[in-house]
Image (spheres, coloured by chain):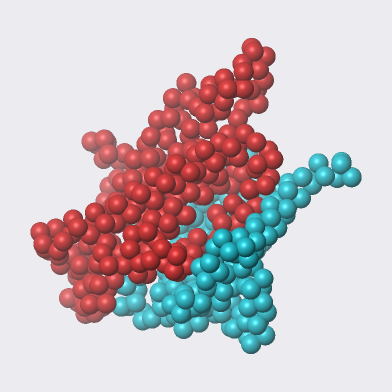
Amino acid sequence: MADVTTDRTTPRQVYFSSFCPSRQGIVGTLAVFAFLVLWQLAPSLGWVNGRFTSRPTEVFLAAIEIFRDDDFFFHARVSLTEFVAGFALAIIVSIPLGVLLGTSKIARYLIDPPLMALYIAPTLVLLPIMVIWLGIHMAPKIAVVFLGAVFPIVLNTMAGMSEADPRMLRMARSFGATKFDIFARVLVPGSLPALLTGIRLAVGRAVLGVVVGELFVSQAGIGYQLNLYGSAMRIDRLLVYAIVVSAFGYTLTVLVLSVENKVRDWRSK
Amino acid sequence: MIDLFYRRQAMILGTLSMIGLLVFWQIAVDSGFINPFFISTPSQVWAEFLVQLEDGQVAANVGATLYCFAWSMGLATVVGIVLGMLAGWFSDVEAALEPFIWFKYSAPTVAFYPLFVAWLGYGTPTIIAIAFLFALTPIYANTLSGIKNIDRDLAKAARSFGARPLDVFLQVALPGSVPVMMAGLRLGVGRALTGVVVAELFGANAGLGYAITYYGQLMQTTKMMVSIAIVILLGVILTQILSYFETKTDAWRVDSGPLI
């Protein structure tokens, strides 16, 4: 089950606090800067058609316009509601399920194959059927977010529970710990980092679910706006919305990652 | 017999639960609990699968999806491994790529779907581009960490026997990182398939994702379920193939501590 946790870039933290910039930081900043300059200049030099690529300055101006008056907060609220509802449902369902599967071997053998199949398979293909079941409002997006988020959390909680240190378990048992004690004192703290890994992986899939769901069919939301400006060829506005979604996913991922690292440190003490 | 049961417990119970799920689905609809319009039944889906197999729809759709899949996965493998090797060996390259990879990692690629349509038009090129971006990150990240986390002792030993940096790279770093790369490829396969099918949901004129949307809009659940089932099966099969290669190359693994 260790393969579930492999889906992450090397756990390198992003350091914001480094006041004296490292060589790495300088090179990274330079690369981004070079990219922006190239992007700005390429249309004027006639290398690419500016209509298709827009420019950083145009995107910046479009961002100001959008935040001022484009019902941005209305659409953001719709998408955020879908995200939060689906994710909360996923957490409520997946943690107990993960605990059950992690502690009972029979349950694991029974539920693991369908679970694995759905974890591997693109759950987003269920979107059209969700639309038939639930209509075109928020409900199918919540369902898709739920489906995207639930499996990584279940599988990682399960892995965390079932990969508890056997020496710890034996020690707890020989000191007379009851089953509940073992659960509360050994299994839960032991599986917390794996659970957080699951949540981190779920964040990405959930954000993807919201966007795909709204692009597919919707009447409001960030994905709706993406579709609108995409078909109107307003690349600048399209990019603003795409960047907002990315920033949201990025912030959340980094946040969970930092909690994860804290928990790992705390556990190893 | 009992002994056999215990040895094969995982497989037997797993198969039983799959069969149980299908039977439950069939019974739930047959007994009138659920309207078959919403979910169809396994027997209808099977019958429809045979029909679609006969008239060549299955072959056409699977072929179109696999064509895009092969292109995007091939591109992602080449680009991901080359970039990963460069970034793993030269720390400046890694630093320069880092912001873009982080952005790529956290951005839902599909958000840029309309942009790709504007650049490449509807259809195959856009699908390949989206799926390529889906699959790129895990392949790059795993190659990078595989090359970076080479066994220091082995590298030192090679150097003290007079190996040049190129030798260390070819003889130590590369073989040592193959298992991690394979893990990256396995993750990439799943993501590439997701990318192809999702992109096909939006705009294509062939492929499994296209069939799902098409029949979805006609509200023909049974026909839609055929393609959904095929996609899920394809995901499992492709990942299993890669898992097989992963265990094959696992013997090459140089123990380099807890990777990722």
Residue A91 in which image quadrant: top left
**In the depicted view, which residue is nearer to us: B172 or B112?**
B112
Residue A198: x and y in percent read 48, 43
Residue A56: x and y in percent read 19, 64
Chain painted cyan: B
Q: Residue furthest right?
A: B1
Image position of A45 with respect to A215: above or below? below
Whether residue B26 can be seen here: yes
- For chain A, the rendered hue is red
Residue B257 in which image quadrant: top right
**In the depicted view, which residue is nearer to us: B126 or B227?**
B227
Residue B22 in which image quadrant: bottom right
Q: Residue furthest bottom?
A: B55
Residue drawn 23% across the image and 77% down it:
A233
Quadrant location of the N terminus of chain B? top right
Left/right placement of residue B125 relative to residue B66 reads left
**In the depicted view, which residue is nearer to us: B3 or B162?**
B3
Residue drawn 27% across the image and 67% down it:
A219
Left/right placement of residue B157 relative to residue A255 reads right
Residue B221: x and y in percent read 52, 73
Whether residue B185 can be seen here: no
Residue drawn 26% across the image and 57% down it:
A78
